[in-house]
């Protein structure tokens, strides 16, 4: 019997076997997908995405606090310009943590470390690269708005500022951002904070035995990445960094 005759004679059973094998292969693929997700979820440290997307994960983590929260990042209003909704949720979580801290006699404890005004302004300018030279043309002075106009318009609306985004000078935008930071500092004044007089090259949020840390990219915020970890060595290391930051500022007489 030729191969052609064999295939023709047994076409039906061969087709049935092929169908079964296809279903088995599909099942294995689905199982492997779920298995990989399970493995990923059980890893002590994992990538949770780019800025500002990972801010939502920070908020979720803050809401689980039972014993302690340690925050160390560039500014009080983290991601206020990049994603207003993520910022609003993050702000609410911090305010809730503050209320719990006060109501329950510092349980969970709340430690806040942010860069001071001078550093925050420097980071903002590094991000937007404004041309502030007196000899700059209008086009040159407005170039910082490129790729940010829609967000700038939304930011102005959210801040209740009636000015037009197209005519807003960078210096005025800078003031609005800093005013928002100062309001947040005032809102959380009951727990205080440590102002750091240097740029931070690692941000982190510790909640009990878990932490999220981020590697920022000041020039291109979207390239900054966040990582979730329950690795005890990493969490303890971040705690030590926070203590050193606070101790250094106290020794320099700048703790507030």
Image (cartoon, rainbow, N blue to C red):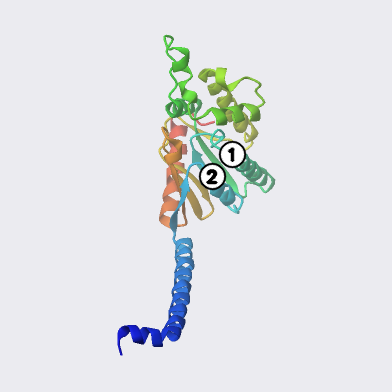
Q: Is residue 232 above or below residue 253?
A: below
Q: Is residue 207 above or below residue 119?
A: below
Q: Who is closer to the viewer here, 93 or 48?
A: 48
Q: Secondary structure at mark 2?
A: helix
N-term mark: 1 or 2? 2
Q: Who is closer to the viewer here, 192 or 118?
A: 118
Q: Quadrant of the N terminus?
A: bottom left
Q: Quadrant of residue 93?
A: top right
Query: Residue 64 in the image: x percent, y percent?
Result: 60, 53
| Residue corresponding to mark 2 | 55
Q: Residue at x 60, y 29 (%)?
A: 155
Query: Residue 127 in the image: x percent, y percent?
Result: 44, 29
| Residue corresponding to mark 1 | 87
Q: Who is closer to the viewer here, 103 or 127?
A: 127
Q: Residue at x 46, y 78 (%)?
A: 19
Q: Who is closer to the viewer here, 31 or 238?
A: 31
Q: Secondary structure at mark 1?
A: helix
Query: Residue 193 in the image: x percent, y percent?
Result: 55, 35
Q: Which mark is residue 164?
A: none
């Amino acid at each position: 019997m030729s191969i052609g005759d064999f295939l023709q004679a047994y076409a039906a059973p061969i087709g049935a076997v092929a169908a079964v094998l296809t279903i088995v292969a599909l099942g294995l693929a689905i199982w492997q997908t779920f298995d990989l997700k399970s493995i990923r979820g059980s890893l002590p440290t994992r990538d949770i995405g780019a800025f500002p997307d990972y801010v939502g994960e920070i908020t979720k983590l803050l809401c689980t606090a039972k014993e302690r929260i340690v925050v160390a990042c560039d500014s009080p209003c983290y991601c206020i310009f990049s994603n207003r909704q993520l910022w609003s949720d993050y702000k609410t979580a911090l305010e809730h943590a503050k209320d719990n801290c006060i109501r329950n006699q510092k349980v969970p404890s709340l430690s806040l470390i942010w860069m001071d005004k001078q550093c925050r302004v420097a980071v903002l300018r590094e991000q937007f690269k404004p041309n502030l030279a007196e000899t700059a043309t209008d086009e040159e002075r407005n170039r910082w708005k490129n790729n940010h106009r829609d967000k700038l318009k939304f930011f102005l609306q959210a801040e209740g500022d009636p000015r037009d985004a197209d005519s807003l000078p960078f210096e005025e935008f800078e003031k609005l951002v800093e005013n928002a930071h100062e309001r947040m500092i005032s809102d959380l004044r009951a727990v205080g904070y440590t102002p750091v007089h240097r740029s931070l090259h690692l941000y982190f949020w510790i909640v009990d035995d878990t932490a999220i840390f981020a590697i920022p990219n000041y020039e291109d915020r979207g390239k900054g990445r966040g990582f979730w970890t329950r690795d005890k060595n990493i969490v303890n290391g971040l705690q030590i960094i926070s203590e050193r930051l606070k101790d250094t500022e106290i020794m320099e007489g700048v703790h507030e």
